[in-house]
Image (cartoon, grey):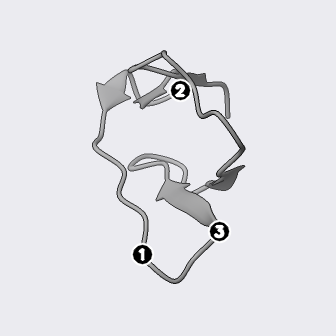
Amino acid sequence: MRFLCAGQYIRVYRRPESPFYLARCPKCAKCVRFRVGKGGSDARMFDVSC
């Protein structure tokens, strides 16, 4: 995951019991949640504008 305001990439993990991924920007501390959906995604990188 790339946070655009920080210009940094971070790796995001999901807890096994959680239905979503949770990430926090290393610069502005904005928190974003991504839900786990059926079929998933082929994308390996996601950009977050915060």
Sooner in the amino-acid sequence: mark 3 or mark 2:
2
Residue 27 location in percent, x, y?
43, 46
Nearer to us of marks 3 and 2 is: 3
Residue 7 location in percent, x, y?
38, 21
Secondary structure under the numbered disc 2 in the rendered image: loop
Decide: is 1 above or below 29.
above
Q: In this view, does 41 lie to the left or right of 45?
A: right
Label drawn at residue 15: 1
Q: Residue at x 42, y 31 (%)?
A: 1
Residue 17 location in percent, x, y?
51, 83
Secondary structure under the numbered disc 3 in the rendered image: loop
Residue type at mark 1 is: Arg
Q: Distance between the residues labelled 1 and 2?
A: 26 Å
- The crowd level at tag 2 (other Cα within 10 Å; few <14, some 14-19, many 20+) is few
Q: Which residue is labeled 3 in the image? A: 19
Residue type at mark 3 is: Pro
**Quadrant position of residue 6:** top left
Q: Which residue is labeled 2 in the image? A: 5
Sooner in the amino-acid sequence: mark 1 or mark 2:
2
Report the residue that reaches farthest toward the front: 39
Secondary structure under the numbered disc 1 in the rendered image: loop
Q: In this view, does 50 lie to the left or right of 12?
A: right
- The crowd level at tag 3 (other Cα within 10 Å; few <14, some 14-19, many 20+) is few
